[in-house]
Image: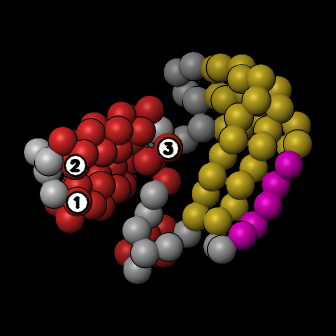
Amino acid sequence: MVTCELYRMSRLGMCLTETLDEMVMSGTLGPELAIQVLVQFDKSITAALEAQLRAKVTIKGHLHTYRFCDNVWTFILQGALFKSEELQENVNVVKIVACDSKLLSQ
């Protein structure tokens, strides 16, 4: 994984990608600059999460599926309970994607 694309599938990442595609198609933005914006997006999201998130969360649920491919773990949980110091939330189905943070800098 040359660039970490974990956050591009979020709502924010998909909207950014769609907007950049429209700007490239209309000629407002060059394709090289659009790629640079996406790479910077990945770096900015990663840096913000590292700097601002310090809360601990406990997750309990039924492990439906798990896999490990290309140094990335994917877990599908059913009936998950997310519990932090201030709140507790039940989620029917959740997909967790995790990778080694050392690989993000490569």
**Kind of residue at disc 1:** Pro
User: Alpha-carbon distance for marks 2 and 3?
Assistant: 20 Å
Q: Name the secondary structure under disc 2.
A: helix
User: Alpha-carbon distance for marks 2 and 1?
Assistant: 6 Å
- Which is nearer the N-term, disc 2 or disc 3? 3
> Which residue occupies the foreground of this view, 95 or 50?
95
Please tell me the numbered disc located at residue 31: 1
User: Alpha-carbon distance for marks 3 and 1?
Assistant: 20 Å
Q: Position of residue 22 (x, y in %)?
A: 27, 39
Q: Position of residue 21 (x, y in %)?
A: 30, 45
Q: Position of residue 76 (x, y in %)?
A: 78, 43
Which marked residue is nearer to the observer: mark 3 or mark 1? 1
Q: Dot 1: within a 10 Å radius of its alpha carbon, few (fewer than 14), some, or many (20 or more) residues?
A: some
- Which is nearer the N-term, disc 2 or disc 1? 2
> In this view of the protein, can residue 52 be seen by the observer?
no
Q: Is residue 8 left or right of residue 57?
A: left
Reading the image, the residue beneath label 2 is 24
**Kind of residue at disc 2:** Val
Q: Which residues are magenta?
A: 65-69
**Kind of residue at disc 3:** Met
Up-down: is 105 above or below 25? below
67 drawn magenta: yes
Q: Residue at x 75, y 67 (%)?
A: 68
Q: Is residue 7 left or right of residue 73?
A: left
Q: Dot 2: within a 10 Å radius of its alpha carbon, few (fewer than 14), some, or many (20 or more) residues?
A: some
Residue farthest to the bottom, as pictured: 106
Please tell me the numbered disc located at residue 9: 3
> Is there a contact, CB below 8 Å, between mark 2 and mark 1?
yes
**Picture quadrant where residue 14 is located:** top left
